[in-house]
Image: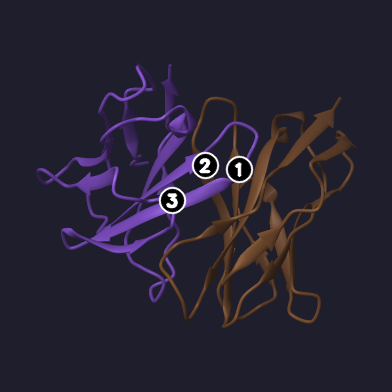
Chain colours: A purple, B brown
């Protein structure tokens, strides 16, 4: 069964540095998402992406965050200047359609981001 | 805005017994409800969803969930628990009218003891 893959599985970065988290969504999916889960807390929506642009974003997704689909397969999340509170597990997800098609989102295994 | 609550942090059951993991939701429009499971060091795996139709939906690994509109609940159930069902379970809701995003509950850790 096709899977969403994320790299790296664990990223350790100094505070203030830029970090890029990578995701390869399922190949026929059109909608892409990023979520994060701070240790011991709930999964939080960050952003959704369709047709090469952001379709929805949460209040968490401020100016230090950006997303990009640089080629036909990768979907990246960039954090420009990391803060200690950015330490979390970041999940990428993809789906065939959006809310109107009601297709479930399929999640990657996550990237654990640790900011020192 | 939509929200979802999982009132139990932890559920413990004996193998072979029925299990229930509770979820209640709040939306302004029609709810689209989902259950996901997370095994250690893995991502969220889709179990089942409710969109419309039959209130009892069946999903992967023998799980099912019952949509109750009057109680705004979507409890996850399984008639006979397995030790391998031990994991973290997340309920999620999407508002049919509003955003593309899903709101997740805080998660319930299910432990099935032999």
Q: Secondary structure at mark 2?
A: strand
Q: Which mark is residue B44?
A: 2
Dot in front, 1 or 3? 3
* Label 2 in the same subunit as label 1: yes
Q: CA distance from mark 2 to mark 1?
A: 6 Å
Residue A37 left/right relative to A14: right
- Callout 3: chain: A
* Residue A76 position within the rendered picture, expressed as x and y whole percent measured from the top left: 24, 40
Instruction: Say above or below: A80 vs A46.
Output: above
* Label 2 in the same subunit as label 3: no
Q: Which residue is mark 3?
A: A60
Residue extending farthest left: A71
Q: Residues within 10 Å of mark 3 (few under 14, many from 20)?
A: few
Q: Which residue is mark 1?
A: B37
Q: Which image quadrant: the N terminus of chain B?
A: bottom right
Q: Residues within 10 Å of mark 1 (few under 14, many from 20)?
A: many
Q: Which image quadrant: the C terminus of chain B?
A: top right
* Residue A82 position within the rendered picture, expressed as x and y whole percent measured from the top left: 35, 30
Q: Secondary structure at mark 1?
A: strand
Say whether marks 2 and 1 touch (CB < 8 Å): yes
């Amino acid at each position: 069964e096709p899977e969403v893959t994320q790299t790296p599985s664990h990223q350790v970065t100094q505070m203030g540095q830029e970090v890029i988290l990578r995701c390869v969504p399922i190949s026929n999916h059109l909608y892409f998402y990023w979520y994060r889960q701070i240790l011991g807390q709930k999964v939080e929506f960050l952003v959704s992406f369709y047709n090469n642009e952001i379709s929805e974003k949460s209040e968490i997704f401020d100016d230090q965050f950006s997303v990009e689909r640089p080629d036909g397969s990768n979907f990246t999340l960039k954090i420009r200047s990391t803060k200690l509170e950015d330490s979390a597990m970041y999940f990428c997800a993809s789906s065939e359609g959006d809310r109107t098609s009601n297709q479930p989102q399929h999640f990657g295994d996550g990237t654990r981001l640790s900011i020192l | 805005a939509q929200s979802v609550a999982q009132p139990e942090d932890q559920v413990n059951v004996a193998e072979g017994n029925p299990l229930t993991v509770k979820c209640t939701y709040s939306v302004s429009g029609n709810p689209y409800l989902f259950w996901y499971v997370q095994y250690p060091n893995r991502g969220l795996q889709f179990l089942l969803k409710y969109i419309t139709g039959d209130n009892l939906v069946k999903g992967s690994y023998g799980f099912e969930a019952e949509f109750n509109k009057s109680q705004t609940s979507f409890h996850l159930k399984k008639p006979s628990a397995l030790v391998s069902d031990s994991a973290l379970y997340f309920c999620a809701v999407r508002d049919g009218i509003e955003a593309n995003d899903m709101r997740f509950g805080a998660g319930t850790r299910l432990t099935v003891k032999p």
